[in-house]
C-alpha cells in the first residue's frame, strides 16, 4: 500500500496518537480515526463520538451542537466504516451522494483505503501491464 495522504500535520499526529491511545491498529480503528482526524472540529470532539472505554462509536454524537455539515458527513462515513452503521430513518444521508458532497471528499477515499486495504491496492502498475499486453496483442 502506498503512503497515507493526510490533510495536515495535525491530522497525521491525531491519527497516530489515537491508534496508540486505543492500542489497536486494525483497519476499523485506522479508518475511523483517519476519517475523524480530517477536521479540527471533529478532532476536538472525538470523545463525543467514540467511547474509548468501551472501544465503540457513540451515534448520539451525530446530533450535537458542534457538528457542522462537513463534520456530520465525515462522522457518518467514520461510523459506517467502523461497523456499517447507518442512522435509522436517515439512511439516505449515508449514501455517497450525500456524504461525498463536501470538501473532505478527497480524503474520504483514503479513509476507505484504510478500512479495506486488501481491495484498495494501487492499480497503476496493473494498468500499465494491461495496456502493454493490449498493445502487443494488437500487432
Image (cartoon, helix red, strand yellow):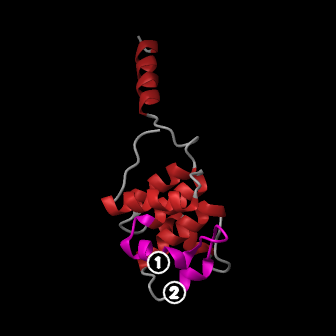
Residue 64: give its label.
2
Magenta-colored stretch includes residue 42: yes
Q: Are marks 1 and 2 in contact (CB under 8 Å)?
A: yes
Mark positioned earlier in the residue sequence (1 or 2): 1
- Say if 108 sits above or below 85 in the image: above
Q: Is residue 29 left or right of residue 37?
A: right
- The residue tagged with tag 1: helix, strand or loop? loop
In which image quadrant can residue 52 be found? bottom right
**Is residue 6 in view?**
yes
| Highlighted magenta segment, given as a residue range | 37-63
In front of the other: 46 or 7: 46
- Say if 66 sits above or below 17 in the image: below
- Say if 22 sits above or below 61 in the image: above
Q: Is residue 93 left or right of residue 102?
A: right
Q: Quadrant of the C terminus?
A: top left
**Residue 89, percent from left and from top:** 66, 80
Q: Which residue is mark 1?
A: 45
**Residue 138, percent from left and from top:** 43, 15
Amino acid at each position: 500500500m502506498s503512503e497515507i495522504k493526510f490533510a495536515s500535520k495535525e491530522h497525521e499526529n491525531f491519527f497516530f496518537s489515537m491508534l496508540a491511545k486505543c492500542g489497536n491498529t486494525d483497519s476499523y480503528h485506522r479508518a475511523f480515526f483517519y476519517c475523524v482526524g480530517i477536521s479540527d472540529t471533529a478532532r476536538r470532539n472525538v470523545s463525543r463520538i467514540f467511547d474509548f472505554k468501551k472501544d465503540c462509536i457513540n451515534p448520539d454524537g451525530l446530533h450535537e451542537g458542534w457538528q457542522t455539515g462537513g463534520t456530520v458527513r465525515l462522522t457518518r462515513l467514520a461510523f459506517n466504516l467502523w461497523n456499517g452503521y447507518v442512522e435509522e430513518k436517515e439512511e439516505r444521508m449515508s449514501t455517497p451522494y450525500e456524504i461525498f458532497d463536501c470538501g473532505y471528499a478527497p480524503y474520504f477515499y483514503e479513509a476507505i483505503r484504510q478500512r479495506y486495504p486488501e481491495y484498495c491496492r494501487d492499480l497503476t502498475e496493473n494498468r500499465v501491464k494491461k495496456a502493454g499486453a493490449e498493445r502487443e496483442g494488437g500487432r
